[in-house]
Structures are given as structure tokens and as C-alpha cells.
Amino acid sequence: MTVIDIALRELQRDTSRLVRDVEETGATYRVTVQGRSTAVVLHRQTVPPSGATVGQARASALYEDKPAEVLAAQLAELERSRDEAGWVERP
């Protein structure tokens, strides 16, 4: 899956175009703020009918885990901000 990074301003300006692109082509967009990834990802998914079981919801990708690259970026940001705040690692 190819993930296309878009700036928050682009999302605000072109929301309808981006949503239409996701629906029609299956494109995946990751929203960034000043070049840093956010928790916002636009991608197509199937929504189970009302009253679906937990297994059906999981199978529909509603509870999809974050991609490894997003988790790595979030961890790096957390460590960087912790180091800047002067936290020291406990033994």
C-alpha cells in the first residue's frame, strides 16, 4: 500500500477532492502537520452492517493496527520530545 503524505492545510482546502479520490481509486493519505505524521489517515474501508459481530468488524478493517512506519514515527517523536524536556532514563 502506498501512503501519500498531505499537509493539514491541503486537507482543509481540498477535502472533497481527497475523499472522492479515496473512494474512487482507493488512494491512502496520511495527514502531516509541519512535516510530522499525525494520527489521521484517509483510506477506503468496508463498513459492516449495523449489528455486526466483533469478528465481522475486525475483518472489515475497522480496527486495523497502525502501519509500522506510523508507529515508528510516533515513537521517534515521543523520544525526541522527552529528550528535549530533559527526562533521563531510569536504571
Image (cartoon, rainbow, N blue to C red):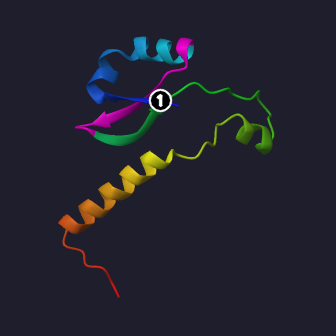
Number of numbered discs overlaid on the protein picture: 1
Q: Would you say residue 27 sits in the magenta stretch? A: yes
Farthest bottom residue in view: 91
- Quadrant placement of the C terminus: bottom left
The quadrant where residue 35 appears = top left
Q: Is residue 5 above or below residue 22?
A: below
Q: Is residue 29 above or below residue 91?
A: above
The picture places residue 50, in percent across and down from the top left corner, at 76, 29
User: With 25 as the anchor, is 78 left or right in this view?
Assistant: left
Circle 1 — which element? loop
User: With 10 as the anchor, is 84 left or right in this view?
Assistant: left
Residues rendered magenta in the picture: 24-35
Residue at the image position 46 percent from the left and 33 percent from the top:
41
Q: Is residue 26 above or below residue 74?
A: above
The picture places residue 37, in percent across and down from the top left corner, at 34, 41
Residue at the image position 55 percent from the left and 19 percent from the top:
26
Residue at the image position 30 percent from the left and 63 percent from the top:
79
Q: Is residue 64 above or below residue 6?
A: below
Residue at the image position 30 percent from the left and 79 percent from the top:
89
User: With 5 as the anchor, is 49 left or right in this view?
Assistant: right
Mark 1, other Cα within 10 Å: few <14 / some 14–19 / many ≥20: few
Label 1 belongs to which residue?
Answer: 2
Q: Would you say residue 12 sits in the magenta stretch? A: no
Give, as a three-letter code, the residue at label 1.
Thr
The picture places residue 47, in percent across and down from the top left corner, at 68, 27
